[in-house]
Amino acid sequence: MRFAQRVIQTTLALDPLANLPRTGWRLRGVVPCESIAEHSYGVAVVAMLLVDELRARGEAIDGELVLRMALLHDAGEVRTGDIPLPGKSPALKRELEHAEASFVEATLPPPQQEAWRAVEQGDSLEARVVKAADKVQMMIKVLAYERQRGAMLEDFWHNPKNFDERGVAAAGEVFDAICEQAGRPRPRAHAGAQ
């Protein structure tokens, strides 16, 4: 496929993300709420700032790869929509992952497929930064929705999984600051908890 056609096809394929809402917000009565595309943009901004901080601390990190991963981390949700974790049984989770992977493989060019797969695997520093940025963006959005709309999103503040820094200390510092601004303690996973 020629370059120009690939740009058009890829952009059109991902365009529905702009109109697909983040379901977790809607389930909690936050309407209207951010779209999946708005969330991905927010994750990219947080990831960019984390990359800058990690580099300032002497870490070697591929910032371009981080941004590619952040922008594409929810690309497969064009096919499946955004289904929050509590609504996913293990069988449904596998089925959704397969549908998302099929969409990515059929739609995105190879370099973008590689970035998506890398963040799905989650092993590299770059993937861990994106996964931490995903949670940071979500908790900043919780703070924003509570402040701007008076939303009651209490359950987010009590779930330690929402504060998973993925071994990225800079993300942990942001979580601490979010909790401080909200006047709430940061929940910690119990020893031995997964």
Image (cartoon, grey):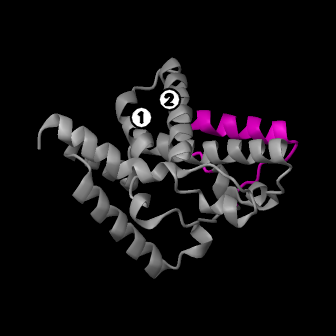
Indicate which disc residue 134 carries. Answer: none
Report if the CB atoms under discs 1 and 2 are less than 8 Å apart.
yes
Which residue is at the front of the view, 67 or 103? 103
Q: Position of residue 52 (x, y in %)?
A: 51, 22
Q: Which residue is mark 1?
A: 67
Q: Position of residue 151 (x, y in %)?
A: 82, 53
Q: Quadrant of residue 30?
A: bottom right
Which region shows up in magenta? 164-189
- Residue density around tag 2, few if under 14, some if 14–19, many if 20 or more, within 10 Å: many
* Residue 80 sits above or below residue 89 on the image: above
Q: Which residue is mark 2?
A: 48
Residue 74 seen: no
- Tell me: 130 left or right of 149: left
Q: Quarter of the image containing the C terminus?
A: bottom right
Query: What amino acid does circle 1 point to?
Result: Leu
Which residue is at the front of the view, 22 or 111? 22
Residue 175 falls within the magenta-colored stretch: yes
Q: Position of residue 157 (x, y in %)?
A: 77, 54
* Residue 127 sits above or below residue 100 on the image: above
* Residue 56 sits above or below residue 191 on the image: above
Q: Quadrant of residue 147?
A: top right
Spatial separation of the CA atoms under disc 1 and disc 2: 7 Å
The residue at 36%/63% (across/down) is: 100
Q: Quarter of the image containing the N terminus?
A: top left
Q: Residue furthest top?
A: 56
The residue at 63%/43% (across/down) is: 136
The residue at 82%/58% (across/down) is: 154
Query: What amino acid does circle 2 point to?
Result: Met
